[in-house]
Amino acid sequence: MSYVDTTAIAINPRARRRRLLRKRFLRRPLAVVGLVVAAAFITAAILAPVVAPYSASATDFNATLAPPFTHGHLLGTDELGRDQLSRIIWGSRASIQAGVFSTLLAIAVAVPIGIIAGYYRGWIDPVIARLTDVLLAFPFLVLAVGLAAILGPSLTNATLALGIGAVPGLIRIARGEALALREEDFVRAAVANGARDASILARHVLPNMLSTLIVQATVTIPAAIIGEAVLSFLGLGVQPPTPSWGVMLSDAQSYVSQAPRLAIFPGIAIFLCSLSFNLLGDGLRDVLDPRTTR
Amino acid sequence: MGGFLLRKVGAALIVLVLASMLVFAGVRAIPGDPALALGAENRDPAVLQAIRHKYGLDKPLPVQYLNWISLAVRGDLGTDERELSVSNTIVQRLPITLELAGLAILIGSLIGIGAGVLAAWRRGKAADYAATTVALVGLSVPHFWLGILMIIYFAVRLHWLPAGGYVPFSTSPVQNLEHMLMPAIVLGTGLSAVLMRQMRSSMLGALGADYVRTARAKGLSELSVIGKHALRNSLITVTTVVGLQLGALISGAVITEQIFVIPGFGRLTIDAVNQRDYALLQGVVLVAAAGYVVVNLLVDVVYSLLNPRIRVSGAAT
Amino acid sequence: MTVLAVEDLSVRFDTDDGVVHAVDRLSFGLEQGEVLGIVGESGCGKSVSVMSLLRLLPPTAHVDGRAEFDGVDLLSVPTSRLQRIRGREIALVFQEPMTSLNPVFKVGNQVGEVLRRHLGLDRRAARARTIELLDLVRIPAPERRVDEYPHQLSGGMRQRVMIAMALACDPKVLIADEPTTALDVTIQAGILDLMRDIRERLGTAIVLITHNLGVVADIADRVIVMYAGRKVEEAPVHELYAHPQHPYTVGLLGAVPRPGAADEQGRLREIPGRVPSLAELPIGCAFAPRCPRADELTRSRSPELSEIRPQHFVACFHPGPEWQER
């Protein structure tokens, strides 16, 4: 048996809190499932070249519209003989990329702005609030469509559009958190002790916002994943031949009577991917909220 | 209450103005020479110059903006590529989308609010888990996929409902509803999921509040405690959520109309982009933004009417 | 005549950090027309115990024991019957007048609810009676206040409305959980006056929960002192103040600012240490860690209640009126 310095763990409040959080998280099977499935999608996206049985564009005109469980094609093929399973795996790249990067972009932009608005208030707060309102006045899709028109359709531009669409909401949240935190005693104490603004923001404000931000991120990602699918479906995102679940769904519309499964499988992929992040986000929210007792 | 509303109206106006500027700038930023598009790709410089002059494209940007906005405020959004009045096109198509949105809100609210109250009431029991799970699924499901699935199943396989298209209400109410049913359900699903979670959360908050404890201590029946005391407070929060969801509803309408081939306002957006019809795009986006701002203002009004703390100013706090 | 008889009331909560024993075998009786004061620090279980009587605790609470009222056991009687007792025979006034009234309904509506529900009055009769009640609790211009919303009233007035609501059906028992804690000192006096008035005019038995010993001295007939979920002392009020026996009571009285209460150096005495967490109660007497009389015996066994003077009960191995036992 090895000797562990248990006194350190017992006394260190941060480590104890982390253990408590992990315990609470593990008590929620749905959240764990969400984590596992989301991780699986991310892994599939990263390791696509290794995991997918075929390349995304390998056509096989001898086996077009093959049903599932045909030899060599677990989920069948599409009208050009391309393996569905592989395309779905390759398609996860676009979705995860768009979902994760757009959210990161949105957070990187929104959090500083929100903190400035919420912490400093003054004249800058109403200005930021009005600008946020203006952005919010455009329904997300209309905004994305407009951006696609200006910048031209591509995965990068779609990611950009999705990120910009998420910014106003995140600004609101970051602002709310900063606003509440600036009234906290420990922040006031730091100010009274003469700490510099940057130091206060970095050491007191930001870490306390972290849990809210994490939860928001895990909830924004699925919305962005669906958003990418929508944009690609409309032809405003990923351009063929790059595979994307949205493009697959769009193509499948013509074969609705012959081979409905062409629409079903990519849709299930979008659904499961988004659901897993939602479950994860919900679980994290429950775990990090001090008011829930389990 | 007057002061509250006045500030809201003022803010809304500022937002509208800024939004219109953004729309204008955005459309102008689209690459390509609008004169070329308007002149059916005729590259004769003289013709292009004439076109520019005709449409006022040779004037400085701020002047162009003012020209546009002054006409827009009076309801004239110019003409699109096919020389049709943009305003007319919008006016023709908007009611269709409004009907779709209205049905979606109706379906979404009934299901969402009902499920939310049920889940809060039966918290922790089977009904709660079922409702919460269904809501989560409803949030995660891509709605355009749901639409396609419904078409596959109900239209293609079972032939119960038409796969798409539109029949005006005046022509045949029954057929109109038949065509609108699936799209409305698809559109309402997202709304109901969000509403259910919001309602459940509000109700749980209300049920944990002190005044609910007081209501119980007074010996009121559970029905009265939940249905009267808790519900009334929760509905107030929920109305604001419905208003906020309008943006998502319009986005959803765009795709839904695309899948179900409904000639509504949402499809106009896609058409405008695909056809590079800038005047149309400008008008459509402006109307969408303006509509959103107006609806939010209405939501604020409704909220202030429902919440006595704003409606009637207090004495001491 | 005993109106309410509580026997071995125990309440425990299951939380993430383990089981919390909020109340441990509390027993007391309430006589008709008397004012019983329950005192103790925050977290000693006094609020939890009375809320458990009307089964108003969240579902995570487990309640054991008996509470006999009017021939039934409140803790086990069917909910429908309990709902006829709540508000009608036993009424509860809460601590936070700010949040205890529903903000979206008019005050008259909320008071009238009780009248309509329990006494079957119609709207007009209920409104008339409500105005009478608001007048009874000394709210000026009651005909106007009836149609106002809670946020339009001050804290003191809201508390009076709560009391009016509680008295509407002329209950046998009024339980007031820290009714003055959230209010200014000057308003407190008014509320206490009102309660005294109620007791005299209506003969209602009152259970008054507070951590303020001054209030108890003012209005109670009998006092129960609670610590860490248990009753540690019980006595008629004058007896308790004149001859406190439990070191906690002695400490509390010593900490009350009064002329002549200071010790030799002119300081108020404070009780050292902190209230133990109800999830980690020590073996032996719960007060031992802070007690100047603690020894091997008190640290290993928990004392039970015994009658040390006529009508005066204390749970202590070394009872006595001085802080330290000589």
Image (cartoon, coloured by chain):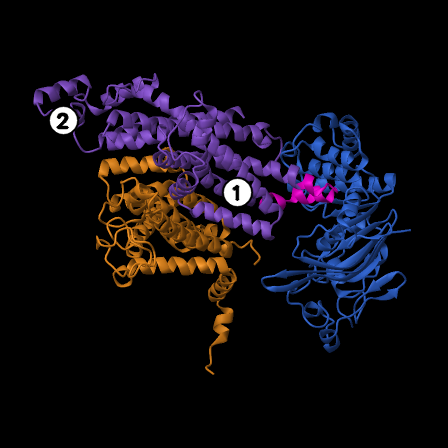
Chain colours: A orange, B purple, C blue
Q: Secondary structure at mark 1?
A: helix
The subunit letter for the residue under badge 2 reads B
Q: Is residue C256 visible?
A: no
Q: Which residues are magenta?
A: B205-225
Dominant secondary structure, magenta = helix
The mark lying in front, picked from 1 and 2, is 2
Q: Is residue A290 visible?
A: yes
Q: Looking at this view, is B50 or B141 the one in front?
A: B141
User: Is residue A200 covered in magenta?
Assistant: no
Q: Are marks 1 and 2 in contact (CB under 8 Å)?
A: no
**Can you say whether A269 is above or below B53 in the image?**
below
Disc 2 marks a residue whose amino acid type is Glu
**Can you say whether B86 is above or below C102 in the image?**
above
Q: Residue at x 22, y 33 (%)?
A: B30
Tell me which corner region of the image, top left, top right, bottom left or bottom right, holds residue B167. top left
Q: Residues within 10 Å of mark 2 (few under 14, many from 20)?
A: few
On the image, numbered disc 1 is attached to which residue?
Answer: B196
**Can you say whether B279 is above or below A250 in the image?**
above
Which mark identifies residue B41?
2
